[in-house]
Image (cartoon, coloured by chain):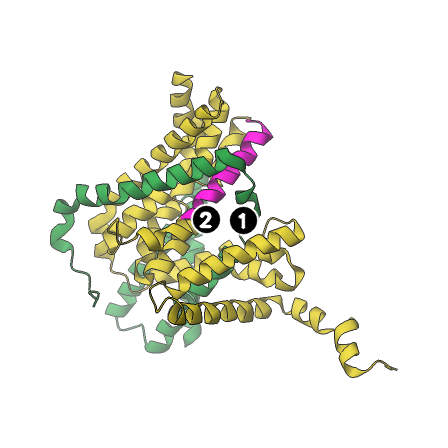
Amino acid sequence: MNCLPDWQFMLLSKHSLVVLLEKNSLITALFMVGAILWVSSFISRKLTSGRIHASAIAIFMGLALAYLGGMMTGGEKGLADVPLLAGIGLLGGSMFRDLAIVATAFGVRLQEFIATGLSGIIALTLGIFVSFLIGGLVAYAFGYRDAESITTIGAGAATYIVGPVTGTALNASSEVIALSVAAGLVKSILVMILTPFVASRIGLDNPRSALIFGGLMGTTSGVAAGLAATDEKLVPYGAMTATFYTGLGCLLGPSLIFMIVKLFT
Amino acid sequence: MVIYGTALLAFCMLVGLVIGQMLGIALGVGKNVGGVGIAMLLLIVLSDWLRRRDRLPVPTRQGVLFWSSIYIPIVVAMAASQNVVKAASGGWLALVAGVTTVLACLALVPVLSRFGSNVAEPQDSPPGDKP
């Protein structure tokens, strides 16, 4: 027997709307993301008269919502920690993201990769070393003097995965590891936001420079979102090199780069 | 059938991830090394091979194209599930390290692009030139 009025029943019982949306969280996420894109293309057209790419605005809105979600729940997955929106975490998690990245390679010609392969490899190597160098220098400037901490923070400046992997391998303190993750997150978010604005200035408008960009930046999420907000056609090239970066960084960080840092400390 | 395309995509991704994992183990890194990149290469090679044999009808293509066209929404969902609070609370060191690294690497993009461009210039004719 249900003696509550219908609307109250809808909101309060265990069959409520909230539970229904939670149960179908991936569907809720699809709707939510669609709504974000709709709002951002509206903003792009009406407020910026198309000057700022709708996807750039959508990504920025996503980050802002992730901040809100993190503040509300204290969790680590931004908006996805709100139970109602857990599907965002699944949709935006590495499984679907990687599938979509692979799909963007469909229709790309192999010759284009082969022709630019060498510059991609140079960009990758340079990108890893420059990130470690600058991250390490900043660590030094902030008063860290031991090779373990300097390397770990340098690793964080590579990506937020290389940081903790290197730090754990070198037995760095948990405070330093946390800093390396934060540095990597700052990098990835900055790449997402800055790329569309600097693209024309750095000549990021062809497959070759996208490949180099991916290798230099290395953060898969940053590159994936940054290129999406710039020109979708460039995504496969940047993503291709970026996906090798974290693995190589984890290889070089605790070994070769640590030994180099050790020479200077 | 549309699922053939999606299955082809899934196959490429799984094979790429397995190879990347083996590479990671062989190199002594706990991480997957370039699995997604390898999967991309595999998809390019396989789809090219199928296309030349006329084994890639429109429905099959749609099974792949759906996923590449859903790419931006997925990236937006990814942005919405980032740990932005932690990035913002890392203090000055994290901020300075992140910002300077990004700026330096951005500045290197045109340098590297120019560096090898005389080598690769002849092939530089993308199929769909921008308007």
- Can residue B35 be spotted in the picture? no
Residue B65 at x, y percent in the picture: 37, 69
Taking the magenta stretch, the answer to whether it contains residue A84 is no
Q: Is residue A237 left or right of residue B86?
A: left
Neighbour class for label 2 at 10 Å: few (<14), some, many (≥20)? Answer: many
Circle count: 2
Between A251 and B3, the residue placed more toward the observer is: A251
The colour one sees for chain A in the rendered image is: yellow
Position of residue B36 relative to residue B60, above or below, is above
To which quarter of the image does residue A261 belong?
A: top left
Residue A55 at x, y percent in the picture: 41, 63
Neighbour class for label 1 at 10 Å: few (<14), some, many (≥20)? Answer: many
Q: What's the residue at 37%, 77% (across, down)?
A: B59
Q: Amino acid at mark 1?
A: Val
Q: Can you identify the residue that label 2 sits on? A: A189
Report the chain holding disc 2.
Answer: A
Taking the magenta stretch, the answer to whether it contains residue A187 is yes
Identify the chain drawn in green.
Answer: B
Q: What element does badge 1 sit on?
A: helix
Q: What element does badge 2 sit on?
A: helix
Q: Is residue A14 left or right of residue A174?
A: right
Q: Is there a contact, CB below 8 Å, between mark 1 and mark 2?
A: yes
> Disc 1 and disc 2: Cα gap in Å?
8 Å
Between B119 and B9, the residue placed more toward the observer is: B119
Q: Quadrant of the N terminus of chain A?
A: bottom right
Magenta residues, start to end: A172-190
Q: What's the residue at 30%, 72% (across, down)?
A: B55
Between A154 and A117, the residue placed more toward the observer is: A154
- Can residue A115 be spotted in the picture? yes
Q: Can you identify the residue that label 1 sits on? A: B84
